[in-house]
Image (tube, rainbow, N blue to C red):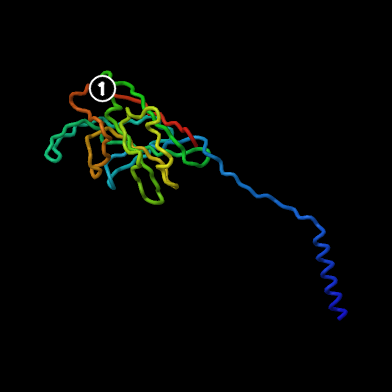
Amino acid sequence: MKIKLCLIMGGVFLLFQAGAFGATTLTVSATVPQAQGISLGISSIVGTGSSAVWTALPAGTSALNFNTMVLNTGTSNGTAFSFWAPTNYFAIDIGVTGGVGTPTVNITYTEGTNPNGTSNGLGTKTGMAFDYVSTAAGSDTLSAFGRKTLTSLTGTAGQMPIADIPSGYWERAYVGVCTGNTNAANGQVDPTGCKTFGNTDAAGTYTGTLTFTATAL
């Protein structure tokens, strides 16, 4: 009994001694920075569907140069067509720099050189499709924001709502000269009201400027 009592008392004494020292806490934290700006990953595309050839343009690319346009003629569903168009179009992937987040980006267009005069410039003959993309899901989907002519991108008309971009996806804008196409199986479909280049258009170089602005990060 004495041995057992001594062991019990010793245990009580050690517990008392251990409780006499104060506890020290360490706060652990890590901060993921909010995005500070946007980045544009631009690719030139020739062809459609699985046979399309994508060429990534260098970082910092500041111009979308369409190939020299060629005349396309033929018939579709019994209707003759004739238009001038380049063989390539562009995909612009909108990302962020300096942190993480899904940015609210507004895209606006300003008409530049127009050999036709004051109307029928490049912006009336070029369209933009607003998609959302996920490499993991293997999908590239036209958003509810749809397709627009470049001349319609004024004010906030080119600002795709964040709600249209599912979590884990990013925004992609396709830019192409209109061809009169209304069938997605044949490639990018033209926005409503987009015109094609025809033989009545003046020869020359048509230009314009697209501006991407992050209104919220």
Q: Can residue 44 be seen?
A: no
What amino acid is found at the position of numbered circle 1 in the picture?
Gly
Camera-side residue: 194 or 208? 194
Q: Position of residue 74 (x, y in %)?
A: 14, 36
- Residue at left offset 42%, top offset 46%: 166
In the rendered image, the residue lying farthest to the top is 117
Looking at the picture, does residue 101 appear above or below residue 124? below
In the rendered image, the residue lying farthest to the bottom is 1
Q: Can residue 17 be seen?
A: yes
In the rendered image, the residue lying farthest to the left is 78
Q: Position of residue 70 (x, y in %)?
A: 21, 31
In what element is the residue under mark 1? loop
Camera-side residue: 75 or 12? 12
Q: Is 215 left, or right, of 51 in this rendering? A: right
- Residue at left offset 22%, top offset 35%: 180
Q: Position of residue 26 (x, y in %)?
A: 70, 51
Q: Is 43 left, or right, of 18 in this rendering? A: left
Q: Is 73 left, or right, of 178 in this rendering? A: left
Marks counted in the figure total: 1
Which residue has dot 1 on it? 204
Q: Badge 1: how crowded within 10 Å, few (<14), some, or many (20+)?
A: few
Q: Position of residue 129 (x, y in %)?
A: 33, 37
In which quadrant of the rendered view does residue 190 lie?
top left
